[in-house]
Every structure is written in C-alpha cells, then in structure tokens.
Image: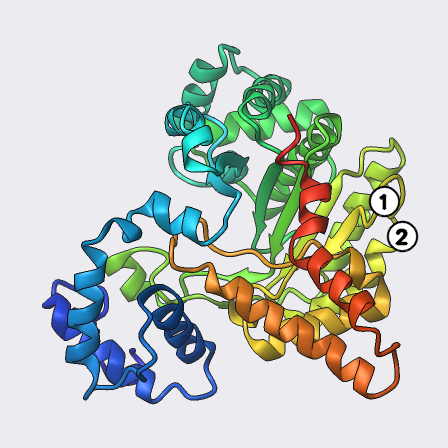
C-alpha cells in the first residue's frame, strides 16, 4: 500500500475503515503478479463465494456483501476453522505462558472437532541483550517454581516448561535467528554473561553469541528428549526504517531478507557438535534468504537418520511465500533429499482466513509433479503421483508431528 502511494493513515493509522478497504482495493488492482492478488481473490471465493475481481469500482459491492456474511455464524472463528477441515491449530507461545486458553479449548475438542496446541517460542529468553531480560527471568522462575541464579537454573526452568507444554499436547518449538555465530562458552563464562544481562550491562557480540549457542545446545537436547520438532527461522533483517519503528513499532512492514552469508556454516557447526551426543532433534529449517536453501538441503543429509526425513527444508517463508518461491523450494528439496517425505505447507494460526494458502500450495505442488510427468522424468502414474500429493498435503505432517496421537 505504501508503494501505491497510500497515506499511512489508511494503512496502520486511525483512518475510516471503509476508506482503508477502498485503498486496499486500489492497491490490489496494481498487484498483478504479486501473491497478495491471488490470495485475496482465493479468500473471497472460498469464504465469501465472491467471484468478482476486487477493484476500486467493485469495492462497495464486495464490502457490503462481505460485511453481511461476517455477521453470520459461519464466520465465527471456530466455524471458520471447522469448515476449513482443519484438525490441528498450533499457536506460538512463550515458555512462561500458563496456556489458560489452551486448557479451555481442550475441553471443547469433542464438539469443535479440532485441537489447539501450543508451540514454544522462547524469544524473550534468547534476547539477553534486550531491556526486560531480568524481569523475564523472574517471570520464568515464578511460573516454573525454579529459583534462577545461574545459566543451569535457566535450563532447569526450561525443562519444567517443556514438561508442561508436552502435557498440553505441545510437540514443536520455534526459534528466530536473525543472525547466528557458533561460539561455545564455559559454565563460569555463561554465568558471568547471564549476570551482565540481568544487570542490563552492555554485552559484546561475542558474549551474545556464546549465550545463544549454549542455550540452543540445551534447547536441542530438550527437543530431542521430548521428541519434539525444532523449527528455525533464519536470516531476516528487521525494523530497517528506524523513524517508523519508533512511531508505530515492530511487525509493520519494514523488514527485509537477511544477508548473513555464513549463517548456515555456523548452524552446521552447532549440529555437528550435537550429533556427537546424539542430540539432533527433528528439525525444519526456514531461511528468508533463498540463497541458503541449497546449503541447508545438503547439510541436512549429513544428520539424517533414525526417522523418516528427520531434517526438512521448510516451505517457502514470508517473501518466498509465492508460487515461484514454493516451486523453487520444492525443486531444491526434491533434488537434494526426498520430497515425497516433505511435511508440506503452513499458514498463520492467527489468521482464520489464511487456510486457502494450503490450496495455493497444493496447486503449485501438483504443477511441479505434473511438469515432471509431462517431461517424462517421472512415470505418468496418476495413482502414484496422487498419493505423493496426499502425503505431502496431510499424511506426512500427521505422522511426523504426532499431534493426533493420544
């Protein structure tokens, strides 16, 4: 919308909601070739049964019809999930969360027809250099009932939270690595670094790297112990427009692809170290920089074993969440590993209208295998190819994560 010259008032500001919608329609008119054009119309068709193109001219009609439908029971969140044939929704949750709403939703599983499960994302624990680290450790200590006076105590508290999340059906953790450098530390060094973080003293980049490396090593051990899947989202560049960050905060459209060229080298060192003690968990790697994909796909082969496709190259993420990005990810996965074992697509659990992205992915997937069959590179066997598509679309994730196992 900014690229279309829309005033910020109608993007993140307090502008009239209808005017915001019209500005979005005007933007969509200029977005041919952008996945937002395709997603917008797929959502309109699948949820609102609107086949008309969204334009400035059609915006009033679509606005009225959509708002009329939004008042119906079909658009209540539970019904949107159920009617989209969703069986499991995973949320991202801080380790200190009491998962209160997960407990309440668990009581409704029989009637709702789907599970809502937590996935642990320990961002506040990773960000030792941020303000509030000391307060966060107090929160984690209170909820885990583990006094935290050392790095080892942090790990004890984390273990307790893994136990709790596991009891609540959690089977995933998620970790954001904007950048990463492998650098190990002794216990004494770690305690000194933690104390500096608690006192909000300036930490060097080397100290931050050492803390993060040792925390990740222990997180990998915990994921292995509980048979969880560890997710890494790597190589992104956040909050580049400082004046706008100061004005409206993070996650407002001022992020870009990261460019750390050796990030996979350092992750490889981490996995090499953990392989020595057989503590490599099931892992899915998502890099925002698609230049990392080939290196990740080949690195994965060095640590496979013990289960089918233990390490996976994740679906095209964020700026790669396009038809071309998906096709590129499928191609690299197929060439360097076994694509029929891929666990497939994912969408934002916060957005109840994002489920058509799975359809979008399935269309790209079918096109990928269809082209191979037409070229004579794989058998033109509709039953075999159909089974592969079904597996990638559903069965593999069902078996890999074990969400529906009692």
Residue 266 location in percent, x, y? 75, 53
**Residue designated by label 1:** 272
Locate the N terminus and report the quarter of the image it occupies. Answer: bottom left
Image point (73%, 42%), residue name: 399
Image label count? 2
Q: Residue furthest front?
A: 383
- Could you tell me which secondary element the residue under label 2 belongs to? loop
Residue 178 tag number: none
Locate the C terminus and report the quarter of the image it occupies. Answer: top right
Regarding residue 85, the answer to whether it shows in the image is: yes
Mark found first going from the N terminus, 2 or 1: 1
From this view, report whether residue 262 is shown above or below residue 139. Answer: below
Residue 200 location in percent, x, y? 42, 33
From this view, report whether residue 329 is shown above or below residue 144. Answer: below
Image point (12%, 62%), residue name: 14
Residue 248: quadrant of the picture: bottom left
Disc 1: CA contacts within 10 A as few (<14), some (14-19) or many (>=20) = some
Locate residue 94 relative to residue 205 in the image: left or right.
left
Q: Are marks 2 and 1 in contact (CB under 8 Å)?
A: yes
Q: Nearer the viewer, mark 2 or mark 1?
A: 2
Residue 168 location in percent, x, y? 53, 24
Locate residue 148 relative to residue 3 in the image: left or right.
right
The residues tagged by marks 2 and 1 sit, at their Cα atoms, a distance apart of 9 Å
**Residue designated by label 2:** 302
User: Closest to the observer: 40 or 292?
Assistant: 40
- Could you tell me which secondary element the residue under label 1 belongs to? helix
Image point (46%, 24%), residue name: 137
Locate residue 176 relative to residue 109 in the image: left or right.
right
């Amino acid at each position: 919308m900014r690229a279309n010259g829309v005033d910020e008032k109608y993007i993140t500001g307090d502008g009239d909601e209808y005017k915001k919608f019209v500005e979005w329609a005007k933007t969509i008119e200029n977005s041919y070739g952008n996945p937002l054009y395709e997603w917008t119309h797929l959502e309109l068709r699948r949820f609102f049964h609107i086949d008309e193109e969204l334009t400035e001219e059609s915006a009033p009609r679509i606005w009225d019809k959509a708002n009329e439908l939004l008042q119906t029971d079909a658009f209540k969140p539970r019904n949107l999930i159920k009617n989209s044939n969703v069986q499991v929704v995973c949320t991202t949750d801080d380790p200190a969360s009491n998962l209160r709403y997960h407990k309440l939703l668990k009581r409704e599983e029989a009637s709702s027809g789907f599970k809502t499960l937590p996935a642990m994302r320990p961002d506040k624990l990773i960000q030792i250099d941020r303000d509030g680290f000391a307060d966060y450790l107090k929160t984690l200590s209170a909820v885990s009932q583990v006094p935290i006076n050392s790095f080892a105590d942090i790990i004890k508290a984390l273990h307790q939270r893994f136990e709790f999340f596991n009891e609540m059906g959690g089977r995933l953790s998620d970790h954001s690595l904007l950048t990463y450098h492998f650098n190990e530390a002794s216990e004494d060094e770690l305690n000194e670094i933690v104390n500096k973080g608690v006192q909000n003293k300036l930490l060097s980049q080397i100290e931050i790297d050492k803390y993060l490396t040792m925390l990740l090593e222990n997180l990998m051990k915990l994921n292995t112990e509980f048979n969880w899947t560890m997710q890494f989202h790597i190589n992104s560049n956040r909050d580049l427009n400082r004046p706008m960050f100061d004005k409206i905060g993070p996650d407002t459209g001022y992020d870009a692809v990261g460019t750390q060229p050796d990030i996979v080298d350092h992750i490889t060192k981490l996995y090499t170290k953990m392989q020595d003690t057989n503590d490599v968990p099931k892992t899915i790697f998502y890099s925002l920089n698609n230049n990392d994909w080939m290196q990740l796909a080949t690195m994965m082969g060095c640590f496979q074993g013990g289960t089918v496709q233990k390490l996976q190259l994740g679906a095209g993420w964020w700026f790669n969440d396009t038809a071309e990005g998906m096709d590129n990810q499928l191609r690299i996965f197929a060439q360097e590993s076994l694509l029929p074992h891929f666990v497939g697509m994912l969408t934002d659990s916060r957005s109840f209208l994002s489920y058509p992205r799975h359809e979008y992915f399935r269309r790209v997937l079918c096109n990928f295998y269809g082209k191979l069959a037409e070229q004579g590179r794989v058998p033109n066997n509709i039953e075999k190819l159909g089974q592969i598509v079904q597996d990638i679309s559903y069965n593999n994730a069902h078996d890999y994560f074990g969400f529906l196992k009692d």
